[in-house]
Image (spheres, rainbow, N blue to C red):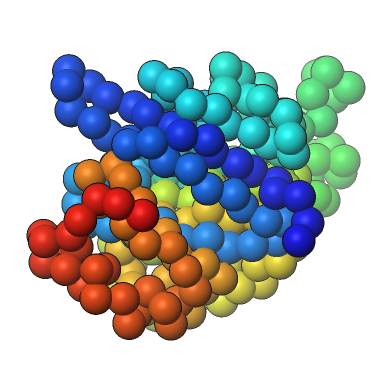
């Protein structure tokens, strides 16, 4: 087995006596897509926030390519190869799709970018930005204001922005939230195209999507892992069924 790209070791996060993450550990292999599922309030988003650097655990350790990144910020982790999407789309509504991705490309270029040039006409920024838009199926929508994009297109744009950071790891928080069937299928196709090239941790309530996408599924209840396995094993696990009925145990 290859060394994991991401590891969590005994993560604990609590708020005023409420345990949001309960001694959670896992390893993510290079190119693996691991889905984390669980009932509302299970602690999934809190866990993802710790992995991305938005929240610091009360105890435990996060390793990226063997390096301890527990104390690093979101920005520092992004520089190492972390990409992130959120439950609520985070894009600039008054900019075009292309302008949004150009900003992400510019951030990736960093200090070497020639600030006196118009970013929207600089081929060193525009060409890769268009490439990322094409990759997520938005090439024909490049010059459309984000405010005029559909919900699904905005979610795809957020993936394009994340890809502009050249991530080795993507942390995706409900990328199909609020989508209809057609838009969900497009997102599934997009994520399948990334699978194997980029390691992905996916939080998602759409179980059809999870079973189509995931190499492995982890089930959280009250911040603790109650089951982990391939999609078929999770589908047949009676403990998981109980968890979704509110009767689950909290031992993995």
Quarter of the figure that contains the N terminus? bottom right
Q: Residue at x 88, y 22 (%)?
A: 112
Question: Does 94 sit left or right of 219 as displayed?
Answer: right
Which residue: 18% across, 28% down?
18
Q: Quadrant of residue 48?
A: top left
Q: Residue at x 16, y 68 (%)?
A: 242
**131 shown above or below 126:** below
Task: Locate residue 197, reporting x and y percent.
Answer: 74, 62
Closer to us: 13 or 88 = 13
- Rendering coords of residue 8 (x, y %): 54, 38
Furthest toward the front, the residue is 251
Q: Is residue 241 left or right of residue 181?
A: left
Relative to 180, say whether 30 is above or below. above
Foreground pick, 222 / 39: 222
Percent x, y for residue 26?
A: 52, 48
Foreground pick, 154 / 20: 20
Quadrant of the image occupied by residue 110: top right
Q: Quadrant of the C terminus?
A: bottom left
Residue positioned most to the left: 246
Q: Is residue 219 visible?
A: yes
Position of residue 224 measured from the top left corner of the image (x, y, whole percent): 31, 45
């Amino acid at each position: 087995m290859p060394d994991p790209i991401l590891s969590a070791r005994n993560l604990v996060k609590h708020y005023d006596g409420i345990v949001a993450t309960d001694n959670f550990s896992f390893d993510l292999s290079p190119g693996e897509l691991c889905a984390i599922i669980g009932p509302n309030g299970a602690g999934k988003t809190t866990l993802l926030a710790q992995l991305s650097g938005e929240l610091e655990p009360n105890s435990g350790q996060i390793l990226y390519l063997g390096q301890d990144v527990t104390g690093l910020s979101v920005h520092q982790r992004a520089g190492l190869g972390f990409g992130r999407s959120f439950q609520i789309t985070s894009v600039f509504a008054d900019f075009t799709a292309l302008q949004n991705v150009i900003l992400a490309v510019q951030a990736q270029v960093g200090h070497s970018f020639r600030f006196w040039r118009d970013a929207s006409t600089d081929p060193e920024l525009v060409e890769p930005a268009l490439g990322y838009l094409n990759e997520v199926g938005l090439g024909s929508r490049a010059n459309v204001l984000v405010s005029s994009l559909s919900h699904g297109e905005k979610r795809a744009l957020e993936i394009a922005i994340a890809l502009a950071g050249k991530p080795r790891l993507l942390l995706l928080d409900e990328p199909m939230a609020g989508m209809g069937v057609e838009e969900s299928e497009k997102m599934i196709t997009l994520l399948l195209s990334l699978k194997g090239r980029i390691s992905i941790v996916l939080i998602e309530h759409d179980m059809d999507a999870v079973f189509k996408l995931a190499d492995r599924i982890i089930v959280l209840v009250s911040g603790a892992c109650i089951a982990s396995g391939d999609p078929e094993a999770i589908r047949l696990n009676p403990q998981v069924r109980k968890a979704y009925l509110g009767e689950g145990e909290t031992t993995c």
